[in-house]
Image (cartoon, grey):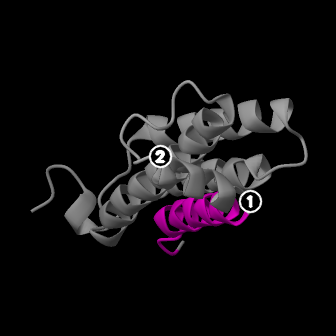
């Protein structure tokens, strides 16, 4: 299998942030016009938008780390696929028509990828 787990997480995070920007430009403008610092709380809409964007950025960060590990042909932690899958199931159960299905797909891919044997570089104790 190719190293697609990290790239898929990066793409999901980028899509998440793109949707947030597309639908939240007014919210971003309000935050900026209020000086950004301490301009999110107590406005509930701004808080939702802010954490929506943070979630997308965190998905990109996890994707970059995953891609780096995959490129080195090291073994991904076994829990990563399960946790990404659980996140996708949780999100999809709460909002069935959402990007949660993409996260489920990435989690399944990471689980399958984790079952494959890795190259010499990723094997512990290899000479």
Quadrant of residue 42 in the image?
top right
Q: Residue at 62% across / 48% down in the picture?
A: 107
Q: Does the magenta portion include 10?
A: yes
- Residue 27 in the image, given as x and y percentages of width and height: 64, 51
Would you place residue 43 above or below residue 23 in this image? above
The answer to whether any part of residue 112 appears in the image is: no
Tag nearer the camera, 2 or 1:
2
What stretch of residues is rendered in magenta?
2-22
Viewer-nearest residue: 97 or 82: 97
Quadrant of residue 20 in the image?
bottom right
Q: Residue at 55% across / 42% down in the picture?
A: 50
Q: Is residue 45 left or right of residue 74?
A: right
- Residue 89 in the image, given as x and y percentages of width and height: 75, 35
- Residue 74 in the image, given as x and y percentages of width and height: 29, 59
Q: Which residue is mark 1?
A: 23
Q: Which residue is mark 2?
A: 34
Q: Main secondary structure of the magenta part?
A: helix
- Residue 103 in the image, given as x and y percentages of width and height: 67, 50
Q: Residue at 40% across / 48% down in the picture?
A: 35
Q: Does the magenta portion include 115?
A: no
Quadrant of residue 9 in the image?
bottom right
Mark before the other along the chain sequence, 2 or 1:
1
Would you place residue 90 above or below residue 67 in this image? above
């Amino acid at each position: 299998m190719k190293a697609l787990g990290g790239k898929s997480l990066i793409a999901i995070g980028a899509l998440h942030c793109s949707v947030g920007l597309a639908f939240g430009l007014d919210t971003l403008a309000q935050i900026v016009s209020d000086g950004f610092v301490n301009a999110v709380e107590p406005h509930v809409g701004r808080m939702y938008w802010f954490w929506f964007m943070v979630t997308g950025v965190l998905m990109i960060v996890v994707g970059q780390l995953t891609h780096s590990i995959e490129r080195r042909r090291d073994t991904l932690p076994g829990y990563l696929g399960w946790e990404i899958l659980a996140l996708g199931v949780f999100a999809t159960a709460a909002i069935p028509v959402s990007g949660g299905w993409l996260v489920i797909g990435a989690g399944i891919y990471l689980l399958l990828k984790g079952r494959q044997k890795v190259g010499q570089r990723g094997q512990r104790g290899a000479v």
